[in-house]
Image (spheres, rainbow, N blue to C red):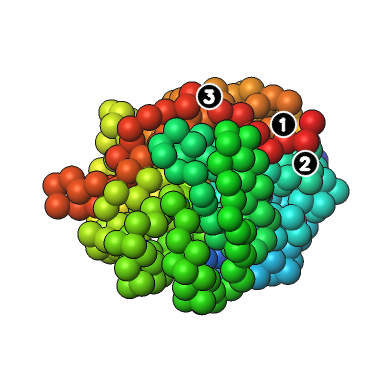
Amino acid sequence: MKTCNILRLAALTSSLIFSAGAIAADSFKIGLILPMTGQQASTGRQEEAAARLYMAQHGDTVAGRKIELIVKDDTTVPDMTKRLAQELIVNDKVNVIAGFGITPSAMATAPLATQSKTPMVVTAAATSSITEASPYVVRTSFTLAQASVSVANWAGKNKISKVITLVSDYGPGKDAEKYFSQTFTANGGQIVESLRVPLMNPDFAPFLQKVRDAKPDALFVFVPSGSGASLMKQFIERGMDKAGIKLIATGDVTDDDQLNGMGDGALGVVTGHHYSAAHPSKMNKDFVKAFEKANNGMRPNFMAVAAYDGMHVIYEALKATKGEGDGDALVTAMKGMKFESPRGPISIDPDTRDIVQNIYMRKVEKQHGQLYNIEFDVLKDVKDPGKTK
Ligand code: DHB
């Protein structure tokens, strides 16, 4: 009898130990790697705030799994992104990696996602080829090809015939230059010159001087989130708008994170992009209000909405797999997902794992004393024009 009790106790103890282990393993970990410092720090600040807002609104338990968000700062250095991803996958055993502020960070990390079969949700970087770098990449941001083609089509219909392009000299800038120029010339326009500025610490002055001297109808620009304000300042200081040179751009330039500080010189700038904080849907109004309330009045930008939607994709995939968390099953569940985002209706292309979304044409206007990108036209359900297959 006594032995029997001891045995029962032993069985009970081991089952307790076992279930304690099971509870620990039960949390579902998301490793969010972002530039929280360095040139692209605004991307990290916006995206972390949005991911935390999503969790605050939707709870931190999904399909019986406790969600654990682990945020890491890659300081805008791609080697660091890769090292952090390796540590998160091997040591922390994360179920998903997400974030990736710039294209080189995403490209450096993609092979690790493939080797470890870890879903990699790209919520910022926007070069078309990123989704082709690993079958585990799913993107919720956008591509420069999506934005640039729409600007080129608009320019062709709006009395702009000679354009100089000015882009940051790396993946997304090259895509912006290529897809803008290709579409614009196919519509009969002329590219007078194609200028590229360094990604890090760019000095726009000598490039803008060149543009002023050449006097095209318009200057088309792509610079990454966070660099728009200094480009705009130098454009206005040179009186280029007054000299009759129109500034047209992807929406990265009139970034909602910086737009209101750019001053009235930004009024009238036309851009194409997938998100404006002024998007007039009920869902967006609620999103902007909640985001500003939780973050001392900070206005959400296109990076924030991509992180918010990235969290949605992860939550819904975990629900669809009934909390299982296997990498292949999660990616399968993400393919073809369709939902309403604060930016409008979006889906994940099941073939390319890239985002399909509306691209809006916008003009900077003043509303309630603040500068906003006001949408005046929309191209619906735009797939990435930059896919090779
Ligand atoms: C990328 C970064 C940005 O900040 C942006 O606005 C667009 C693209 C990139 O590196 O892919």
Residue, x 46% and y 40% (percent of image)? Answer: 155
- Disc with the residue nearer the chain's start (1 vs 2): 2
Dot 3: what SS? strand
Q: Amino acid at mark 2?
A: Glu
Q: Which residue is mark 1?
A: 352
Image coordinates of residue 82 in percent, x first then y, are 73, 63
Split into quadrants, the picture shows ligand 1 in the one at: bottom right
271, 18: nearer the viewer: 271
On screen, residue 299 versus residue 315, left or right, reads left
Q: Vertical placement of 193 versus 76: above or below?
A: above
Residue, x 39% and y 53% (percent of image)? Answer: 246
On screen, residue 81 versus residue 99, left or right, reads right
Which is closer to the viewer, label 2 or label 3? 3
Dot 2: what SS? helix
C-alpha span from label 1 to label 2: 8 Å
Q: Amino acid at mark 3?
A: Asp
Q: Vertical placement of 384 versus 238: above or below?
A: above
72, 35: nearer the viewer: 35
Q: Quadrant of residue 28?
A: top right
Image coordinates of residue 372 in percent, x first then y, are 28, 47
Residue, x 45% and y 33% (percent of image)? Answer: 157
Which is closer to the viewer, label 1 or label 3? 3
Residue, x 39% and y 57% (percent of image)? Answer: 245
C-alpha span from label 1 to label 3: 15 Å
Q: Which residue is mark 2?
A: 132
C-alpha span from label 2 to label 3: 20 Å
265, 360: nearer the viewer: 265
Image coordinates of residue 143 in percent, x first then y, are 60, 43
